[in-house]
Amino acid sequence: MEKTVAVIRGDGIGPEIVEQALLVLNRVAELFGHKFRYTDVDMGGCAIDKYGDPLPPEMLNKCLASDSVLLGAVGGPKWNGVPGPLRPEKGLLRLRAGMGVYSNNRPAKIWPQLASASPLKQEIVDKGIDFLIVRELIGGIYFGRHETLTQQGEAVAVDELRYTEGEIRRIGRIGFETARKRGKKLCSVEKSNVLDSSRLWKKVMHELARDYPDVALSDMLVDNCAMQIVKDPSQFDVIVTENMFGDILSDEASMITGSIGMIPSSSLGDGSRGLYEPIHGSAPDIALKDLANPIGTILAAAMMLRFSFDMASEADCIEAAVSAVLDAGFRTGDIYTPGSCRVGCGEMGRLILTNLRKP
Ligand code: NAD
């Protein structure tokens, strides 16, 4: 099979981790007889430096013309001073909106080899951590009206949180469908004791539940959910929530699994084209030092094969190679524990590459 992939290396550690993912994809292509054609796309700080825009229209068009998009990470202190609409992260928001990817899926699953890296007590980890957060990605407060004005001599900042019934229904369906394919438990997270948008969210979720009698729907307030994720994460199967709540809860969920460097995410809309990336940022503190963990990006590439290209065996093969390398005791600095063997970004990529085997 031949597929085109728009590749956004981005800033900070982005280029190093994406490089390792591409080497893995090329080896998978060799093993399984596929051809992946890559198109380089500039986005983020590097695009601001080159074009004065974090995502020039022609870069977005390259992504829209590809079968899927693989992203490292964008941003960094160099661009902290640039005005809001030109910040590197705005490029990412525009990419998500332009691709119409309204559903972000992030697994929170503990690798047995890394159980001791979780900051949770062992008895909590032993009950199992394996859930998925479905986050609405192109609505809510991040996409509402933002303004800072002066009223009675004082600065006032306003961020609008707005959801339409349709936006809630389409992400709700993804939540129910995802739960149906997993443990059939869906927890809808909102703040309906305070927010109108959350009351509408809850109403729509319960209307949808009638179409999914096989899925057990529960409601949880976001503040309680933040507590429950650290108290008893084993209770969750699939969580569905709005954009900002999902942003915060998914970072918390990633932390309890051991390392932010291990977790991939997929963002999908109505078609098969997706945006695949690790959940972490550009980690400027470790950029260009060969210290980054490339596994989150390599697993994001595996997710791309599974969800956008219908290549489940190929994805299994990558995940098995990652597991084999962890079994053998190799760790990047972020997941290192005494007794294991510390390796850099390039070496971790090379080890995964050499463990890729066609089943
Ligand atoms: P970060 O995720 O970049 O880093 C947080 C901490 O985790 C750092 O100590 C970093 O060294 C470590 N870390 C992250 N990824 C790692 C990896 N693969 N291997 C080993 N260690 C890793 O978050 P931050 O420091 O808050 O943000 C840095 C920049 O990234 C900011 O400009 C931010 O806006 C941007 N950012 C981008 C994205 C994205 O591109 N999707 C997401 C989040 C943050």
Image (tube, rainbow, N blue to C red):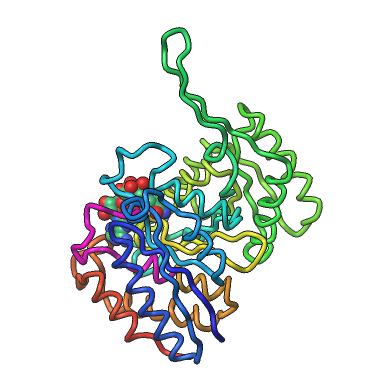
What residue do we see at 61% from left, 55% from top? 100
Give the total of numbered labels: 0
Specify whether residue 263 is in view.
Answer: no
In this view, 342 is above or below 44: below
Specify whether residue 65 is in view.
Answer: yes
| Residue 174 spot, x, y in % from top left | 66, 57
Pick out the residue farthest to the top. Answer: 152
In the displayed structure image, the side of residue 29 where residue 47 appears, left or right: left
Quarter-wise, where is residue 274 in the image?
bottom right
| Residue 43 spot, x, y in % from top left | 40, 57
What residue do we see at 69% from left, 61% from top? 177
What residue do we see at 30% from left, 76% from top? 349
What residue do we see at 48% from left, 64% from top? 276
In this view, 336 is above or below 92: below
In the displayed structure image, the side of residue 135 where residue 168 appears, left or right: right
Pick out the residue farthest to the right. Answer: 210
Quarter-wise, where is residue 277 in the image?
bottom left
Quadrant where the N terminus is found in the figure: bottom right
Please state the extent of the stretch shown in magenta in the rendering: 281-299
In the displayed structure image, the side of residue 203 where residue 36 appears, left or right: left
| Residue 149 spot, x, y in % from top left | 47, 20
Quarter-wise, where is residue 99 in the image?
bottom right
| Residue 275 spot, x, y in % from top left | 51, 62
Inspect the magenta stretch and tell me whether residue 352 lies in it.
no
Q: Nearer the viewer, residue 6 or 297?
A: 6
Inspect the magenta stretch and tell me whether residue 293 lies in it.
yes
